[in-house]
Amino acid sequence: MGRAGEAWVAAVGHLGGGGGAAADRAADLERRYAEPHRSYHTTTHLEAVLRDSAWLGDQIGLDPDERAIVALAACAHDVVYDAKPGDDERASAQWARHALTTAGLTEDLVQRVEHLVLLTLTHTGDDDAAGAVLLDADLAILAAEPRAYAGYVAAVRAEYAAVTDEQWRTGRTDVLTNLLKQQPLFHTAPAQQKWEEPARRNLDSELQALRTNPRPSR
């Protein structure tokens, strides 16, 4: 079992769930993140979100139960990924609900995890500290150094290989514009301090390139 699966099993156990059912779902989780059609939303991305959300949880003082809930939501947030925004997040939330109910978690805990996964539909917060941690960790890649950021963009483009360059440019421009409108982009103070400025530089740079380059790279 890999690190992601271990994180899932540990979080389920912390919250009182059964280990056997958790291990079964962990295997499915790891299989899904390793699907061949994924280029960015892979196990590497999941492990980065787990790492960054754990760091942010430390920074803002989430209690152990909330940290376990964030870990479960991080594991589930892209467990279904077919490059279908909206559908993917809803299907991932449904997967989490089924997996956690099967593992014996209480309904209130299942709802908490499901709620956090669904926050990734819009990446807007609702005064939920755990949700803010998850959303910030999910977008931490936006603050990567320029070469790594370019690799992220290329990987996402590969996941949308079925769309034309024009469709990609239009859709990606909308995504970048909406992200840049968020003031601030990140929800938690530690994330704002660490990632806000480099993320905005990367987003601005990519947006300018899309506006001037008629054929974005795949």
Image (cartoon, rainbow, N blue to C red):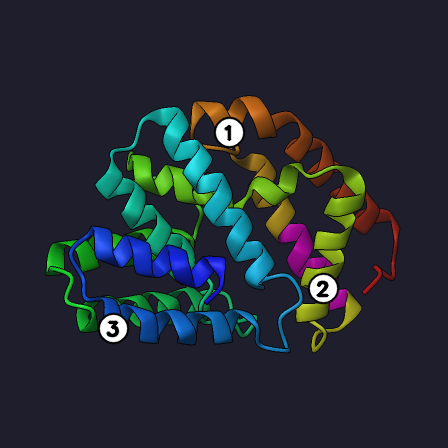
Badge 1 amino acid: Ala
Q: Residue 48 placed where, x, y %?
A: 55, 48
Asked if residue 56 is positioned above or below residue 84 in the image, the reply reads above
Q: Earlier in the sequence, mark 2 or mark 3?
A: 3
**What is the distance, in whole Å, between disc 2 and disc 3 at their CAs?**
38 Å
| Label 2 crowd bin: few (<14), some (14–19), many (20+), radius 10 Å | many
Q: Residue at x 18, y 69 (%)?
A: 101
State which quadrant residue 23 falls in: bottom left
Q: Nearer the viewer, mark 3 or mark 1?
A: 3
Q: Residue 154 placed where, x, y %?
A: 76, 59
State the mark number for residue 20. Answer: 3
Q: Which residues are magenta?
A: 166-174
State which quadrant residue 110 falls in: bottom left
Asked if residue 67 is positioned above or below residue 37 in the image, the reply reads above
- Circle 2: element type: helix
State the mark number for residue 191. Answer: 1
Q: Residue 140 placed where, x, y %?
A: 57, 40
Q: Residue at x 15, y 61 (%)?
A: 105
Q: Residue at x 84, y 61 (%)?
A: 217
- Quadrant for the N terminus in the image: bottom left
Which one is in front, 142 or 43?
43
- Quadrant for the C terminus in the image: bottom right
